[in-house]
Image (spheres, rainbow, N blue to C red):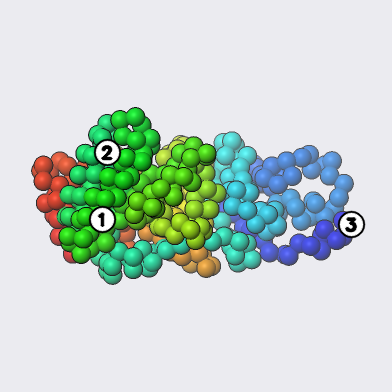
């Protein structure tokens, strides 16, 4: 029976790159611990089946010194350990190791046999451009805010932004189903407002409500949003789960682009030493889970991401990943109209520029402010 189990393994390997602190001996000891902890989580000396030791426990492939005194290490795992499931793949990449100090998960290489289990983004960069009818320039996005405004006020705001040429108008991620702005009222008002503006301008602005919520209501909210004419959805996988986002992306019934918000995912990124790389968490894993655009705080804004970390994310959004479509990076977090040209130079034209509060700061005329942003990227 053990031989049959052994022969059932395909030989395909998942390769995970780590960065670890300590000297080389300590680095190798950490990797030995990780190889066991991320798989069998059982005393290795008590395992009697040789095939488990050889094939199920992670295999240390290399340990290489880095210029900063740390060590880069690669461990490979049998592809079958992931079980073809996104949740288990996340568990393998960053499960118990998220609790271990001095270890960073830097990157992952997945065999095509495993990638084929994942639907990925339904639209990706090319599909979202086609949906919006915008061939080359950066896409423009803003958020309905501040929290506390009612559904009618937010609907009027959405109309003015859509009239000014914004491509995607999203709920701020803090908008849920609060009594001062109920979900159904807000989605109905904003969807109607954007549809009216599109009729008047001939453009294809998309309204994207925030649909992450209680498990027993999230699908009802999604279906309601689609029935009202919402053109996209905002999902926060750190709150609702990566697997939920993947199920929404792959649903032919829903068939809407997804914007992924990073709420609740900052801990392993901003801690020092960090636990997981920016590109892996906010780029690669968002793509696997079906995001068409991944929103993240850009350098120079309210948060602490560096240019190098933002470059990591943008690269992970676009690099080859089997059949998984490339997606838009969505730099946000205190961006301004004045920085639009700079951000375009940095990220390239395949980017969604999310400008929020600054579109209110410039003048009371939100349509004129949006037009200023549009002119800055033409």
Residue 195 — which label?
1
Is 242 situated above or below 9?
Answer: above
The residue beneath circle 3 is 1
Q: Is residue 217 left or right of residue 148?
A: right
Q: State if disc 3 and disc 1 touch (CB < 8 Å).
A: no
Rendered-image quadrant of the C terminus: bottom left
Q: Is residue 94 above or below residue 378?
A: above
Query: Residue drawn 37% across and 59% down?
Result: 328
The quarter of the rendered structure image containing the N terminus is: bottom right
Q: Position of residue 177 (x, y in %)?
A: 38, 35
Residue 301 shows in the view: no
Counting residues from the start of the chain, the first of labels 3 and 2 encountered is: 3
Q: Classify mark 2: helix, strand or loop.
A: helix
Q: Residues within 10 Å of mark 3 (few under 14, many from 20)?
A: few
Q: CA distance from mark 1 to mark 3?
A: 62 Å
What residue lies at 21% left-to-right and 55% top-to-bottom?
Answer: 196
The answer to which image quadrant residue 29 occupies is: top right
Residue 111: percent from left, percent from top: 61, 64
Q: Nearer the viewer, residue 8 or 127?
A: 127
Instruction: Name the element at disc 3.
Output: loop
- For marks 1 and 2, the one nearer the N-term is 2
Q: Is residue 131 left or right of residue 62?
A: left
> To which residue does mark 2 refer?
151
């Amino acid at each position: 029976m053990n031989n049959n189990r052994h022969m059932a393994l395909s030989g395909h390997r998942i390769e995970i790159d780590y960065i670890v602190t300590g000297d080389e001996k300590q680095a190798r000891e950490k990797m030995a611990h990780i190889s066991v902890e991320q798989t069998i989580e059982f005393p290795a000396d008590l395992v009697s089946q040789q095939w488990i030791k050889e094939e199920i426990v992670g295999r240390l492939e290399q340990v290489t010194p880095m210029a900063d005194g740390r060590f880069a290490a690669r461990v490979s795992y049998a592809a079958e350990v992931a079980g073809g499931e996104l949740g288990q793949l996340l568990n393998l990449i960053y499960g118990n190791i998220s609790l271990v100090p001095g270890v960073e998960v830097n990157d992952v290489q997945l065999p095509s046999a495993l990638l084929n289990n994942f639907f990925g983004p339904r639209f990706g960069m090319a599909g979202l451009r086609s949906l919006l009818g915008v061939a080359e320039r950066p896409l423009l996005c803003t958020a309905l805010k501040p929290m506390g405004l009612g559904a009618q006020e937010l609907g009027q705001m959405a109309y003015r932004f859509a009239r000014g040429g914004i491509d995607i108008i999203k709920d701020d991620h803090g908008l849920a189903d609060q009594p001062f702005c109920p979900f159904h009222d807000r989605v109905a008002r904003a969807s109607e407002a954007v549809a009216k503006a599109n009729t008047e301008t001939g453009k294809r602005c998309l309204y994207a409500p925030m649909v992450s919520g209680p498990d027993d209501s999230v699908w009802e909210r999604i279906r309601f949003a689609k029935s009202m004419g919402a053109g996209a959805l905002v999902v926060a996988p750190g709150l609702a789960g990566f697997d939920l986002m993947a199920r929404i992306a792959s649903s032919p019934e829903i068939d809407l682009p997804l914007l992924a918000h990073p709420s609740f995912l900052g801990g392993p990124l901003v801690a020092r030493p960090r636990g997981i790389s920016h590109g892996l968490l906010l780029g690669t894993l968002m793509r696997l889970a079906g995001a068409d655009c991944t929103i993240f705080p850009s350098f120079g804004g309210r948060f602490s991401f560096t240019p190098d970390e933002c470059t990591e994310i943008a690269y992970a959004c676009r690099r080859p990943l089997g059949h998984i479509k490339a997606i838009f990076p969505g730099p946000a977090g205190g961006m301004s109209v004045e920085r639009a040209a700079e951000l375009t130079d940095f990220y390239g034209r395949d980017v969604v520029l999310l400008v929020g509060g600054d579109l209110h700061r410039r003048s009371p005329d939100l349509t004129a402010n949006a037009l200023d942003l549009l002119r800055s990227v033409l």
